[in-house]
C-alpha cells in the first residue's frame, strides 16, 4: 500500500505523523475584471446598508420610534418602515428566514458558491480589510517582502497604521450593528459622551473584536474550517450548476510561453500562476474543483487578463456547468432549464410567500391568546357549579385604549368572570391598554347540572362592537367528570 499522505504531514524518516498543518499566510494579488467589479459593487452596497440604514427616519406618530428599521428588544417589537411585528407575529420573521434559506439553496443550485464569493459578510469584510492592507503595505510581492523585513524599519509604522485602520472599521461595524437595536442618534450621542451603559459599549467591543479577528486575522480559515455551509452546499449542486473551473482540455499540456509564439500542439495555460496569486483562499484552480474554493471568480479575471497578451481567447478559467468543466465534455444546457430541484425550491418560496400574504391579510388591530389552566383543569364549587380558569392576553394594536367585552360561545349557561374586575363581572368592561398586551385571569362558570361531561369545544369572542374588529379563539371547557 502506498503512502498517500500530503507532504506537510508525511514523516521525514518514519517518525510520528503530525496532523498539525501551519496556516500559510496568503497575500492575494490585486486584479481587475468583471468578477472583481461585481464584488466591489456588492461590498460598497453592504457597507453602505449596514452603516446608513439605521439612520433612516420614518414617521410613525408621537410616542413611537421614528427609526425605519429597528429591532426594539425592550418594547419587544420589530419595525420595518410601516410594518410593525409583535412577538405574537414572529412567524413573519420565520417566513423571511425560510425564504432567505431556500433562496440561498436556489442561487447555489444555479450559480454555485456565489453567496460565499460575493455577498457573505465574511467575504465582504475580508475584502475591505485586504484593500486597507494593500493601500498601507502594497500589493502581493511587497506584502510578502514586508513580512520578512526586520522590525526596526518602516515595517512597524505600516503595521501599526494597518491595524489602527482595521480596528476603526471593526468598531464602526460594531456600532452600526448596535444601531439596528437602539435608536441610532440617541445611542451614538450616549456613546460619544460616555453616558452609554456597559452593555452598549460591551456589544460594540464584542462585534468589533469579532470583525477584527475574523476579517483581519482568520480570513479564509473561517471559510475552510469554521463555516458549515461548504460542508453541505454540495447537496444543492447538480450537473447544471455553474462553478468556476479551469478548462483542462484546452489548457493542458501547460508550460511557459513567449508572446507571439505558436500554441500548436500544446495547451493554452502559460503557467503564469496569476490565477493562484489572486486567489483569496490560496488554491490552484487548475487542480480541479476544490472544497476551499469560494467561487469568487477572481482567478477567471486574472486568466482573462493574461490570455489576450498571447493572442488567445479568454475564459480558460471561467464559469461553467459542473458537468462541463472541460471543453472536451458534451455541450451544456442553460442553468435555468427545468430542473426538479429548482421547481421544488421555487414552490417552497411561493408557498411561504402566499402563507405570509394570507397571514398579513388576516391581521387585525385586536387579537388575543388564551391559555387554559392545567392545575386544576376543572373546579367543582360548593353549589355544584363547575369552573374552568384561563389566562387571556389581549393584544390591542390601536394607539388608543379600548374597553372590550369577552363572551363565551358554544356553552349554554356559561358565565364569564374576570378576576381582576371581580368575580361578578360578565366579561364586560375589559380595559385594553393602547399599543400593548394586557393580561387578565378569566373564569368560566357553568351552573350545576348544565355542563356536559368531558371536554366541550367553546369559543371566546372579544369585541368592542366595532363591526369586523373582533377576535375569536377556540378553546375547551372541561367538566369535573372528565378528570
Ligand atoms: S479558485 Fe478562483 S474562484 Fe475559487 S476561491 Fe480561488 S480565486 Fe476564487
Ligand atoms: S492564469 Fe491562466 S494561464 Fe496563468 S496559470 Fe492560471 S490558468 Fe494558466
Image (cartoon, helix red, strand yellow):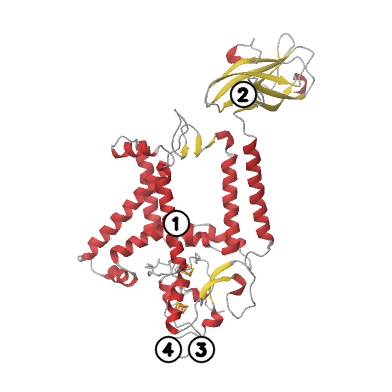
Position of residue 54 measured from the top left corner of the image (x, y, whole percent): 42, 43
Given residues 116 and 374, the one toward you in this image is 116
Q: CA distance from mark 3 to mark 2?
A: 80 Å
Q: Residues within 10 Å of mark 3 (few under 14, many from 20)?
A: some
Position of residue 410 measured from the top left corner of the image (x, y, whole percent): 76, 22
Name the side, left or right, on which 156 lies relative to 399. left
Vertical relation: 48 (above or below) 87: below
Specify the farthest residue to the top: 383
Q: Quadrant of residue 137?
A: bottom left
| Residue occupying image coordinates x 62% and y 23% | 391
Vertical relation: 391 (above or below) 5: above
Vertical relation: 22 (above or below) 270: above
- Chain-order first, disc 3 or disc 4: 4
Tag 1 and tag 2, C-beta contact below 8 Å: no
Q: Secondary structure at mark 4?
A: loop
- Chain-order first, disc 2 or disc 4: 4
Q: Residues within 10 Å of mark 2 (few under 14, many from 20)?
A: many
Question: Circle 2 sits on which residue?
Answer: 392
Of badges 1 and 4, the one in the foreground is 4
Question: Circle 4 sits on which residue?
Answer: 260
Q: Secondary structure at mark 3?
A: loop
Of badges 1 and 3, the one in the foreground is 3
Task: Specify the quadrant that holds the C terminus.
Answer: top right
Q: Is mark 4 within 8 Å of ligand 2?
A: no
| Residue occupying image coordinates x 35% and y 62% | 131
Amino acid at each position: 500500500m502506498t503512502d498517500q499522505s500530503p507532504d506537510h504531514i508525511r514523516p521525514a524518516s518514519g517518525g510520528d505523523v503530525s496532523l498539525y498543518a501551519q496556516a500559510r499566510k496568503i497575500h492575494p494579488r490585486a486584479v481587475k475584471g468583471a468578477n472583481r467589479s461585481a464584488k466591489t459593487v456588492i461590498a460598497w452596497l453592504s457597507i453602505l446598508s449596514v452603516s446608513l440604514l439605521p439612520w433612516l427616519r420614518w414617521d410613525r406618530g408621537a410616542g413611537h420610534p421614528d427609526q425605519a428599521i429597528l429591532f426594539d428588544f425592550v418594547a419587544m417589537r420589530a419595525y420595518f418602515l410601516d410594518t410593525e411585528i409583535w412577538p405574537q407575529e414572529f412567524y413573519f420573521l420565520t417566513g423571511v428566514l425560510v425564504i432567505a434559506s431556500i433562496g440561498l439553496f436556489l442561487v447555489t443550485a444555479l450559480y454555485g458558491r456565489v453567496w460565499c464569493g460575493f455577498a457573505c459578510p465574511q467575504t465582504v469584510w475580508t475584502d475591505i480589510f485586504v484593500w486597507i492592507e494593500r493601500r498601507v503595505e502594497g500589493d502581493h510581492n511587497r506584502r510578502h517582502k514586508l513580512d520578512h523585513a526586520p522590525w526596526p524599519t518602516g515595517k512597524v509604522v505600516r503595521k501599526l497604521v494597518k491595524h489602527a485602520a482595521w480596528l476603526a472599521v471593526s468598531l464602526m461595524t460594531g456600532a452600526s450593528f448596535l444601531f439596528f437595536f437602539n435608536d441610532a442618534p440617541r445611542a451614538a450621542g450616549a456613546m460619544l459622551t460616555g453616558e452609554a451603559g456597559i452593555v452598549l459599549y460591551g456589544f460594540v467591543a464584542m462585534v468589533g473584536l469579532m470583525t477584527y479577528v475574523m476579517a483581519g486575522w482568520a480570513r479564509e480559515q473561517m471559510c475552510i474550517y469554521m463555516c458549515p455551509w461548504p460542508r453541505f452546499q454540495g447537496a444543492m449542486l447538480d450537473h447544471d450548476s455553474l462553478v468556476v473551473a479551469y478548462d483542462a482540455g484546452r489548457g493542458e499540456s501547460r508550460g511557459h510561453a513567449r508572446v507571439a509564439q505558436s500554441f500548436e500542439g500544446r495547451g493554452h495555460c502559460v503557467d503564469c500562476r496569476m490565477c493562484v496569486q489572486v486567489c483569496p483562499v490560496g488554491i490552484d484552480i487548475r487542480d480541479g474543483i476544490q472544497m476551499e474554493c469560494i467561487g469568487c471568480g477572481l482567478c477567471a479575471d486574472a486568466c482573462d487578463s493574461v490570455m489576450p497578451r498571447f493572442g488567445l481567447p479568454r475564459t480558460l478559467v471561467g464559469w461553467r456547468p459542473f458537468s462541463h468543466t472541460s471543453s472536451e465534455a458534451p455541450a451544456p444546457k442553460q442553468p435555468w432549464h427545468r430542473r426538479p430541484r429548482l421547481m421544488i425550491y421555487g414552490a417552497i418560496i411561493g408557498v411561504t410567500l402566499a402563507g405570509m400574504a394570507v397571514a398579513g391579510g388576516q391581521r387585525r388591530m385586536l387579537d388575543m391568546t388564551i391559555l387554559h389552566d392545567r392545575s386544576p383543569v376543572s373546579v367543582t364549587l360548593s353549589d355544584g357549579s363547575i369552573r374552568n380558569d384561563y389566562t387571556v392576553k389581549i393584544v390591542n394594536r390601536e394607539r388608543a385604549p379600548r374597553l372590550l367585552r369577552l363572551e363565551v360561545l358554544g356553552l349554554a349557561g356559561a358565565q364569564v368572570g374576570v378576576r381582576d374586575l371581580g368575580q361578578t363581572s360578565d366579561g364586560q368592561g375589559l380595559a385594553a391598554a393602547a399599543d400593548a398586551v394586557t393580561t387578565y385571569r378569566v373564569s368560566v362558570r357553568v351552573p350545576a347540572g348544565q355542563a356536559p361531561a368531558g371536554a366541550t369545544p367553546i369559543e371566546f369572542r372579544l369585541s368592542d362592537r366595532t363591526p369586523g374588529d373582533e377576535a375569536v379563539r377556540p378553546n375547551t371547557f372541561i367538566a369535573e367528570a372528565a378528570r
